[in-house]
Amino acid sequence: MPASAVFREGCFYHIYGKGIQDARIFIEERNYSYFLELSYKHLTSLVDIYAYCLMGNHFHMLIKVKPKPVDGPVGDASNTVSHGFNNLLNAYAKSYNNTYKRSGGLWRQPFGRQLILSESYLTRVIYYIHTNPVKHSFTNDFTSWPHSSYHALISDEPTILKREELLELFGNRSSIIEFHKQVISYGVMDHMFDNDSD
């Protein structure tokens, strides 16, 4: 496992997972909400979730690893967070297989992870996650995609996202909206993730 794939306490990571052989992992509307429910169940004691996007055959997530509590589980943060993501993916796969009468693996293994080391890269990842449905032709307008964190980020509705920290990062909601618009207008990130297959 490369150094960038080791989970470090207090660090941001771009996480992505894809269906095995590009299989669809979200078929019905309820699949999206169930995946989020499992994410909250298995991850929120280990990481803070800042952004996400769920699409037909894959997902993206921006997380920050929480400090390990003194009375927390034995083992380092890398093993604990990896275990949390594996629990999430395995629980979803089990339910998916039961619902759709299939067997075998659902996910391409291992799930991808990329350490984020700068604020500028962090903001680019947020943009990339929110606009991924456009990249993969699920929609022509990322703001119309219902299964991302974009709307929760710019609204006042209750959310499990670390919205206040992101508002501090960008300045305010208007700045978040303007940032996404400017990036699209100038096309400055057309090739920023050319090596990312998801």
Image (tube, rainbow, N blue to C red):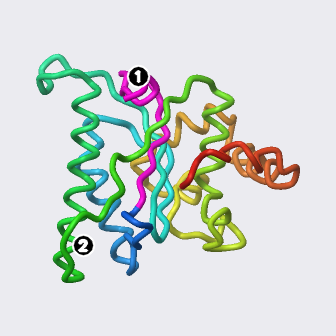
Identify which amino acid the numbered label 2 is placed on: Tyr
Magenta residue check for 2: yes
Magenta residue check for 63: no
Quickly name the residue at label 1. 10
Quickly name the residue at label 2. 96
> What's the residue at 57%, 60% (across, down)?
151
Q: Is residue 124 above or below residue 93?
A: above
* Front residue of this view, candidates 37 and 172: 37
Image quadrant in which you'd find residue 75 = top left
Which residues are drawn in magenta? Answer: 1-18
Q: Is residue 10 above or below residue 98?
A: above
| Residue ranking furthest to the front | 21
Position of the N terminus by quadrant? top left
Q: CA distance from mark 2 to mark 1?
A: 32 Å
Q: Residues within 10 Å of mark 2 (few under 14, many from 20)?
A: some
The number of callouts visible is 2
| Residue ranking furthest to the top | 70
In the picture, measured across the screen, residue 171 lies left or right of residue 32, that is right
Q: Position of residue 158 (x, y in %)?
A: 43, 54
Q: Please, what secondary structure does the residue beneath circle 2 have?
A: helix
> What's the residue at 19%, 59% (across, down)?
91
Position of the C terminus by quadrant? bottom right
Q: Residues within 10 Å of mark 1 (few under 14, many from 20)?
A: some
In the picture, measured across the screen, residue 90 lies left or right of residue 106, that is left
Q: Which mark is residue 186?
A: none
Q: State which tag comes first along the sequence, 2 or 1.
A: 1
Q: Position of residue 131 (x, y in %)?
A: 65, 58
